[in-house]
Amino acid sequence: AQSVSQHNHHVILSEAASLELGCNYSYGGTVNLFWYVQYPGQHLQLLLKYFSGDPLVKGIKGFEAEFIKSKFSFNLRKPSVQWSDTAEYFCAVMPKSGGYNKLIFGAGTRLAVHP
Amino acid sequence: NAGVTQTPKFRVLKTGQSMTLLCAQDMNHEYMYWYRQDPGMGLRLIHYSVGEGTTAKGEVPDGYNVSRLKKQNFLLGLESAAPSQTSVYFCASSTQGVGYGYTFGSGTRLTVV
């Protein structure tokens, strides 16, 4: 069965610290990959996405992610976090064929950034 | 530019009551989805629709029914609510092209007591 695993459920950082959130997926075919962010009390918003090409993708607000096909991973990074990055982050996988664009989400990582 | 609109935003039900959640999108998207979000479990797909008049089961369909009589609307029904259905429900829509992300609604927080 297809699944997405996010290694850290809760992360606490101080402002200016670097961030890396892990994401691994289980699927035999080719996929599109996404990171979504959910700020407190809000709906999910797209941070970045990978379809093909350069495995290092840049998203909004200084976030980037690297697709490593051999490791089935799509880790999210940011060099220097801000208090406003406090949110929950979801990794998601979309099989490229036969899936009607269905997204499979990980359980999420709650990030708290302290001033 | 409304995007995806969900109604209601909050609701409290008693066990056994029924209700319908409405999702409306104005982007002419072919695909629509209903997810539930529970702490520590991420979002799980309940039902989805790939076009007007068509629906399909997702990962956790039991206890829910859906209908898509018009392209812009996707209704989620709970016939007999149970406390296990206490959750936040998100609707999303997507174009037919492979690889496009979703546009999400703002969610419905449902509590079943």
Image (cartoon, helix red, strand yellow):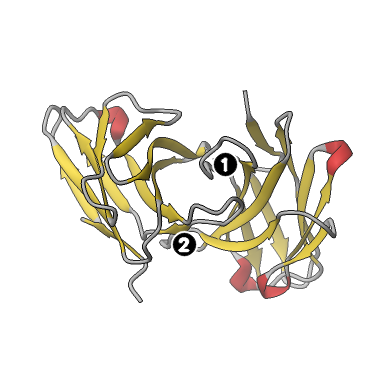
Q: Residue at x 70, y 68 (%)?
A: A59
Kindly identify which residue carries mark 2.
A40
Q: Nearer the viewer, residue B87 or A73?
A: A73
Q: Residue at x 62, y 68 (%)?
A: A85
Q: Amino acid at mark 2?
A: Pro
Q: Position of residue A91 (x, y in %)?
A: 64, 48
Helix, strand or loop at mark 1: strand
Q: Nearer the viewer, residue A29 or B102?
A: A29
Q: Position of residue B17 (x, y in %)?
A: 11, 32
| Residue A66 picture quarter | bottom right
Kindly identify which residue carries mark 1.
A105
Q: Which mark is on residue A38?
A: none
Q: Residue at x 69, y 42 (%)?
A: A31
Q: Amino acid at mark 1?
A: Phe
Query: Dot 1: within a 10 Å radius of its alpha carbon, few (fewer than 14), some, or many (20 or more) residues?
Result: many
The C terminus of chain B: image quadrant: top left
The subunit carrying tag 1 is A
Point out the tag, 2 or 1, that comes first from the N-terminus. 2
Specify whether disc 2 shares its chain with disc 1.
yes
| Residue A73 picture quarter | top right
CA distance for labels 2 and 1: 18 Å
Q: Is residue A53 above or below residue A32?
A: below
Helix, strand or loop at mark 2: loop
Q: Nearer the viewer, residue A7 or B26?
A: B26
